[in-house]
Image (cartoon, rainbow, N blue to C red):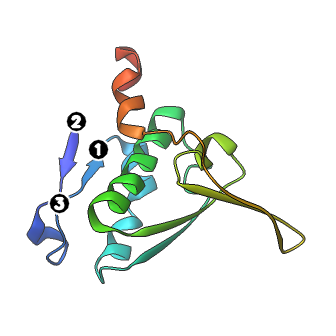
Amino acid sequence: MRLRLSRRSVCGIAPITIPTSCQAVSSSAWLLPALINEPSILLADEPTGNLDTKTSIEVMGIFQQLNRERNITVVLITHEHDIAEYGTRTASFRDGVVVKDHPVARRRVAQEELQALPAESLT
């Protein structure tokens, strides 16, 4: 089950779909205040660090939806290479210096991955 926020519920911002599982809501609840001022960029530090696979995909889906529908740039900091593949480009740092910066060759699409999960994973 998902909670659909109405246009009026977040200060005039278009609706976004937020997962309603306890873990997903608590992991993405910080996002709502961040959207109130209609930012052009979001900084997310390890947003999927303590989440299970399904919830991580849901959170990445929210970021992809914000990027696609509201043109919000999401800068995501992660140690997980598979999570980085949900973005459009990756940059790697060593000792504060960029050592790699390249487009993601095969971007993962959260919505497609959620639909492909086995039914028992969706509860």
Question: Which secondary structure lies at badge 2?
Answer: loop
Can residue 50 be seen from the camera position used here? no
**Dot 3 alpha-carbon crowd within 10 angstroms: few under 14, some 14 to 19, many 20 or more:** some
**Dot 2 alpha-carbon crowd within 10 angstroms: few under 14, some 14 to 19, many 20 or more:** few
The Cα atoms of the two marked residues, 2 and 1, are separated by 6 Å
Q: What is the residue that sits farthest to the right in this orientation?
A: 95
Q: Is residue 100 above or below residue 51?
A: below
- Which numbered dot is residue 15? 3
Give the residue drawn at x 55%, y 56%.
Answer: 47
Would you say 67 lies left or right of 90 here?
Answer: left
Instruction: Give, as a three-letter code, the residue at label 3.
Output: Pro
For disc 1, the marked residue is: 20
Give the residue drawn at x 84%, y 75%.
Answer: 96
Q: Is residue 76 above or below residue 22?
A: below
Instruction: Give, as a three-letter code, the residue at label 2.
Output: Met
Question: Which secondary structure lies at badge 1?
Answer: loop
Q: What is the residue that sits farthest to the bottom in this orientation?
A: 37
For disc 2, the marked residue is: 1
Q: Are marks 2 and 1 in contact (CB under 8 Å)?
A: yes
Mark 3 vs mark 1: give the one in front.
3
Quadrant location of the C terminus?
top left
Would you say 51 lies left or right of 117 here?
Answer: right
Percent coordinates x, y for residue 25 in the rendering = 36, 51
Would you say 99 lies left or right of 54 here?
Answer: right
- Which numbered dot is residue 114? none
Instruction: Give, as a three-letter code, the residue at label 1.
Output: Thr
Q: Observer-nearest residue: 41 or 1?
A: 41
